[in-house]
Amino acid sequence: MNRIWILILCLSFFTSVVAADETLRCGSKLVTIGMSAEEVLKYCGEPTSREVEEHDIRSGNRVVGKTQLNRWFYSRGSAGAPKVLEFDQDKLITIK
């Protein structure tokens, strides 16, 4: 019985760590995957810095277009580790 409780505790800790990587708190607002860049700017303000990478869109061996991956860096000072937000076009896809 004790092993089951230990397993449950470990799983609940792991899920909370994973969930923490999918959100960012900016003041009283919570930024989540899928939000637009405009929403993130409204909640968090301007990032400390930005990077843009251009990638080919392929269909088989052919390049059929281009897409942009935008990385926004937020320095959180002594409040916590810096956060990196990645956008594909205008949609937030990852928070690291």
Image: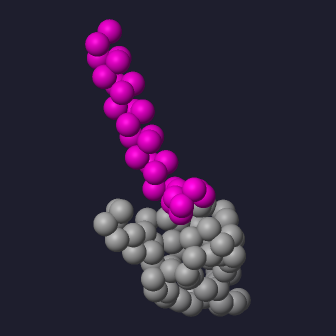
Residue 22: % across, % down: 52, 56
Rendered residue at 46%/51% (across/down) = 20
Identity of the residue drawn at 45% across and 83% down = 48
Q: Is residue 59 magenta?
A: no
Compare residues 73 and 9 and report the one nearer the observer. 73
- Judged left or right of residue 2, residue 15 is right
Q: Can you give x and y, in whole percent of width and height, for residue 87 in the image? A: 59, 75
Magenta span: 1-30
Vertically, is 41 above or below 56? Answer: above
Position of 30 compared to 12: left or right? right
Give the residue displayed 55% in from the left and 81% down from the top: 46
Q: Is residue 53 left or right of residue 75?
A: right
Residue 7, image quadrant: top left
Q: Main secondary structure of the magenta part?
A: helix
Q: Is residue 87 above or below residue 62?
A: above
Q: Position of residue 84 (x, y in %)?
A: 45, 72
Residue 15 among magenta residues: yes
* Viewer-closest of 2 and 46: 46
Q: Quadrant of the N terminus?
A: top left
Coloring applied to the structure? one colour
Could one spot residue 75 in this view of the protein?
A: yes
Q: How many marks?
A: 0
Asked if one can make out residue 82 in the rendered structure from this viewpoint, the answer is: no
Q: Residue placed at 42% from the left, 33% from the top? A: 12
| Quadrant for the C terminus in the image | bottom left
